[in-house]
Image: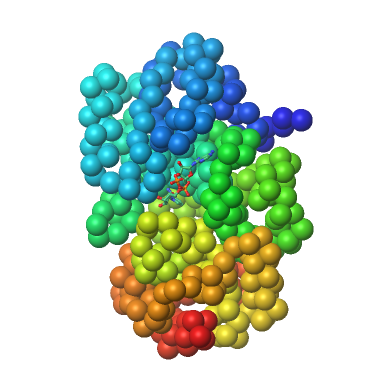
Amino acid sequence: MNQIERLSVALDDRRYEILIGEELVAGAGRHLAPLLGDRRVMIVTDETLAGLHLGTLERALEDAGIAAEAFVVPAGEASKDFATLQQLCERLLAAGIDRRTVLLAFGGGVVGDLTGFAAAILLRGIDFVQVPTTLLAQVDSSVGGKTGIDTPQGKNLVGAFHQPLLVLADTGILSSLPRREMLAGYAEVAKYGLLGDAEFFHWLEGHGHAVVEGEPNALRQAVLISCRAKAAVVAADERETGSRALLNLGHTFAHALETECGYAGELLHGEAVAIGMTLAFELSAQLGLCPPEDADRVRRHLAAVDLPTGFERLGGRAWNAARLIEHMHKDKKASGGHLTFVLARRIGEAFVSRSVEEAQVAQLLTETIA
Ligand code: NAD
Ligand code: MG
């Protein structure tokens, strides 16, 4: 009961721990006090979390004798912009932060990316703690130190690498997360199985439903395995000069779909990733690199948990293969005119390829759209 899992992200002088379990928000004071001593905490959160769970966090810090103040930003991707960053930084400076002040990001990936970036630049860098509250943030964005904001030119184009002091992933807090957000996070969970851990994917085929339904043991296990996978990749390649690129499985397709749909919520990132991973396995099968049965398994599992795997659930839009490929070329991950894809030899064995012919991508997209 109430088991807490601990992982550490091995980054020499910036090694940090990830704690995973239920009720970590209610117990936050106990986990933070030894690390922070008498340092002041500035909580950054969004309006949704402020309405649902901020009181619990504030009480936990207060009970542990930690002085804290909260700063609330509007919920949603639009808060990852220069205007919100500027306001946040100015409010924090006006509140008298100093180099020992610790920011605490309490929210999903939006709050985590924004707060982490503010921490990276305020006073030339102060410490921050991640308390991720979406499945996506727990298994992906809170681990690895990428922080940043969006600009009119694209997502995450302004940012910094800044690692947190600690990550507290409270799986119990996910019980208030809307189902659609839970599923979107699940796509990134499945990704870890597909890119490097066939056994985990097999486990998900049996337990995926329990994970998305929020069954505590299944959820804790899924977050643990996912964070362990992400931590290992990050420790091996913090700045994405090599193997970290495997985490982009499905993302070349996903980013093109997101560009096409815009970021107003028509298609969540995780939903785009589910479609993208299905297409990446289908492309791999079409190129003769991967058994077609594996591509079928990917599609079947993602569909079984109710994630989209093709264009059929994105009706009403005139999809166009050439335009999607154009979006891919504009993606920051396309380098030297070559599209980069993460392909697979089988489930659990992905690799990066820069030699996929555009015509083959166009053929797959055209068949999928039809
Ligand atoms: P989000 O932060 O917008 O959260 C989704 C919605 O859920 C929001 O409306 C939020 O208010 C609400 N919410 C959060 N926790 C809740 C809870 N416990 N109960 C009820 N509602 C809750 O979105 P997200 O999917 O968590 O994160 C997406 C962002 O993460 C994107 O900006 C993306 O670029 C970024 N990201 C960053 C990295 C990285 O490495 N830094 C990796 C992946 C994604
Ligand atoms: Mg992603």
Residue at 49% of width from left, 70% of height from top? 314
Q: What residue is drawn where x is 37% and y is 69%?
A: 260
Q: Is residue 190 left or right of residue 62?
A: right
Residue 22 image point, x, y percent: 65, 32
Residue at image position (37%, 49%) is 77
Residue 322 falls in image quadrant: bottom left
Residue 166 makes an appearance in the image: no
Question: Where residue 331 appears, x then y in whole percent?
Answer: 34, 67
Farthest residue to the front: give it. Answer: 316
Q: Can residue 179 be seen here?
A: yes
Residue drawn at x 55%, y 53% as measured from the top left: 180
81 versus 258 height, above or below: above
Q: Nearer the viewer, residue 361 or 228?
A: 361
Quadrant housing residue 1 = top right
Task: Identify whether 263 is placed above or below 364.
Answer: above
Q: Is residue 95 left or right of residue 312?
A: left
